[in-house]
Image (cartoon, grey):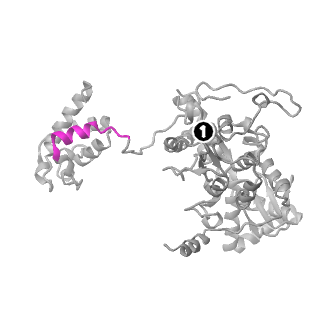
Amino acid sequence: MNKFGYTISRDNQIDYDKVDRSMAAFIEKNEPTFRICIQCGSCAASCSAANFTRFSFRKLCLLIRRGLTDDVQKEVSKCMLCGKCRLVCPRGVNTRNIILNVHQALHKTTVYEL
Amino acid sequence: MKLEGKKRIWSEYQKEIADDHYYYARSCIRQNFFPASETIFLRIMQQELGKDIKDDARHTTCTGIAYHSDLVPFDTTMTVVARLFSLMTEAGYENYAPSCITSFGLYSEILETWEHHPEIEARVREHLWKSTRREFKKPKNLAHASDIVYKFRHRIAEKGKYRLVNHKTGEPLKVVEHIGCHYSRMFPHKGVGGAEYPYVLVGMIEAWGGEVVDYPERRHCCGFGFRQYLVKSNRGYSISSSRKKFESMEPFKPDMIITNCPGCPYFLDRWQYAISEMEGKTYGENGNGIPVLTYEETAGLVMGYDPWDLGFQMHQVSVEPLLDKIGVPYDPYAKYLGVNGKFIGTPEHPEVLKVY
């Protein structure tokens, strides 16, 4: 309620003690390579979708770890599942399976299973 | 690290604080926000410690608020401050003791400017002479009033009746200290402990028996920021900063907050009400807020002065729970009584924040 004529702005601080870890935990359980990502950005650099959108797999991983589910939902729909990122990943992260698990996790969130 | 080494390094963070004979410069806004604070300072200095301190009715604003709101140019500010120094010189004092942190920061800025640019000082002297036919000497010692209370903190503790201790459990009270931004951030060597380890309020808290709360946003600004508050459309920045601090200190369950700036206690006190109305959130125990005191009020509390003489009825967040913890007796019916026992009326009660 804006009874004073101004409101409280939310800051962008991420408190890792308070973030929602449910999606990250779900993905780590189903695709353990999610843990070994070193965030080098090779996936983002080689991304086909990034030619047309601002999609970045690296950013998606960051959003998942930060528990920003709404932002994850907006981002993940941009991926075309071409799998080039998986070919270039120096750590062997199964990026396509992570994307599929994100979709699953989002569905489970919608039906209150996660 | 060797103890001698620590002492040597710490000595570099100290400042010289005059022992006696101060020219006191009151704050523009404190007399409205927390009106008893400056009176208590004078009472403690003059009556309890027997110090010579001049409270001059002729002095004006230092223009700090207008200067930091980009309304008054620096030359005007320097000339007004030069007049204040001339009043000090005329009264025969050499130690300048401002009550306001912003004034203190501004005096430091001006003296530093004059030190590096003598031609600016000469120009200001000319401005002052042309406009008022006055001359001045620069203060030999510039110490904020909180520096002076810090210097005499142990004597206040010796003379004091109470300590910042829960009288039922014997545990020290958890105290949040909040230093005004203009105290030592601009000129670190002008403050006790510098910008890195400002010790002025910590020293008081420790001397008076409390325990300092070290929380993540301890050095965050209260949010006043002059234009952040003065321009209504910017006020969201102000309250957001205070909220950030409250959210950060809340898990440590502080019993009180002490500040040494005019704006900080006001905003940390009043924003607790605004946040409670906007979000239904309070930061103290059982729907109470966290009481916010100035260092003079805290010193007066330690000295055992009557809480209503300390102006606690002017606080938005009720101080009664704190008084109960320390064991300070008070008459709840006398809270809103004027000089001759005349009832002066009570303020409206907020919807969420518990007040007494």
Residue B32 part of the magenta segment: no
Residue A26 part of the magenta segment: yes
> Where does the image place residue B25, in percent across and percent down from the top left?
79, 56
What's drawn in magenta, residue-wise? Answer: A18-32
- Of B19 and B60, the residue lying toward us: B19
Q: Quadrant of the C terminus of chain B?
A: top right
**Is B356 placed above or below A63 here?**
above
Q: Is residue A52 left or right of residue B186?
A: left
Q: What chain is tagged by disc 1?
A: B
> Which residue corresponds to mark 1?
B290
Quadrant in which residue B155 is drawn: bottom right
> Where does the image place residue B201, in percent across and percent down from the top left?
64, 55
> Where does the image place residue B211, in percent across and percent down from the top left?
59, 51
> Where does the image place residue B321, in percent across and percent down from the top left?
65, 35
Type of amino acid under label 1: Ile
Quadrant in which residue B45 is drawn: bottom right
Say which residue appears at 51% left-offset and 41% top-offset.
B250
